[in-house]
Amino acid sequence: MNYDFIPISERKPLKWPNGKRLAIILTTNFEYWDPVRDTPKPYYPGGPSIVGGDLPGNVYDNANYTWREYGQRVGVWRMFDIFDAEGVPSSCTINAKMALERPQVVQAALDRKWEIVAHNYVQSELLTDNMFDEDAEREVIRATLKVYEEFCGYKAKGWLSSSLRSTLNTIDILAEEGLFFTCDLLNDDQPYMVKTRSGKPMVSISYTSEVNDFSFLRQGLGAEGGLQMFKEQFDWLYAESATTGKFMNVGLHPHVIGQPYRIRALRDFIRYAKQFDDVWFATREEIAAWYMQNHASHIEVD
């Protein structure tokens, strides 16, 4: 994996299709956690916990497991209602075990013809566990993609690693397995091309750890504070996009934003952004496919 360092000041203006100015990606993460793992090592859940303290993997953590499961049983359906009512799509990420263990959630997104992005095999398993074993990492990726294709009926186009913990080999493996965009690189407000050892194209569509409902937990935000965060990000990017197109990703987790006292922040932000005719509620695949064909007018690739 390799990419050029080209600061935004050295790029040509990015012009989105159809005169759009700012692309918005509403990312809903469908994530499954095993209740226990066959190990005495501390259980890594991915994302913050509602009750602190590490338990061994083979000890059931009821408080945190059932808190997260709230998102699958209740919170995500509240989100679906909002997206449907407001007429906007979500870009959904799924780990393989979500399709196997909570198929109703994934099927609901498929029924709406929303984007599905591969998101590792299970949330508590990190690709960095295989940092020094590329074959093992490839096996995890292939197992994930196999479940994805069997459940969705088509091949995955893009990838987001659990907890964004990828290795220096991940993007090269993804390209070799036929994917063409990655969300793991958190370093931009615009797409860019990533070089791969196979020469196959790979577009970076950055996820975000900043404009993310985990910030509600980490910063103690309620609906008003979270809405203000979303709007501040939008307003500044929208102003900058007068001269060069940008995208804004919003990271969402059903067990967090799906709580009744937080959900209004999502609804009201969508309503706010919909007031702007030149805003594009986009999928990553749409952005990546378009950018592969048009990157030369923005950033030349050697």
Image (tube, rainbow, N blue to C red):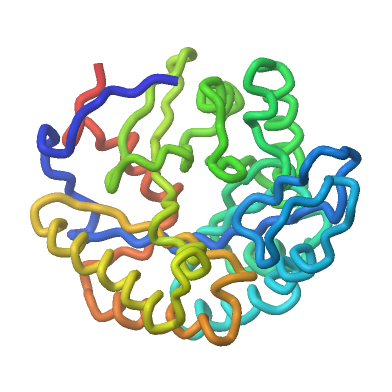
Above or below 265: residue 162: above
The residue at the point 44 percent across, 55 percent down is 283
Q: Is residue 137 visible?
A: yes
Residue 296 spot, x, y in % from top left: 21, 30
210 or 268: nearer the eye?
210
Q: Position of residue 152 (x, y in %)?
A: 70, 51
Name the image quarter holding the C terminus.
top left
- Farthest residue toward the top? 197
Residue 80 seen from this side: no
Residue 237's quadrant in the figure?
bottom left
Q: Quadrant of residue 140?
A: top right
- Callout count: 0
Residue 99 location in percent, x, y?
76, 54
Indicate left or right for 108 with 210 as reference: right
Q: Nearer the viewer, residue 221 or 129?
A: 221
Where residue 26 appears, as percent x and y from the top left, is 45, 64
Q: Residue at x 12, y 43 (%)?
A: 13
Quarter of the figure with residue 121:
top right
In depth, the one of 221 and 268 nearer the eye is 221
Residue at image location 85% in from the left, 56% down from the top: 35
Which residue is depicted at the point 58% across and 65% down? 253
Left or right for 182, reference 61: left
Q: Is residue 6 above or below residue 208?
A: above
**In the figure, 210 relative to 184: above or below?**
below
The quarter in which the N terminus is drawn is top left
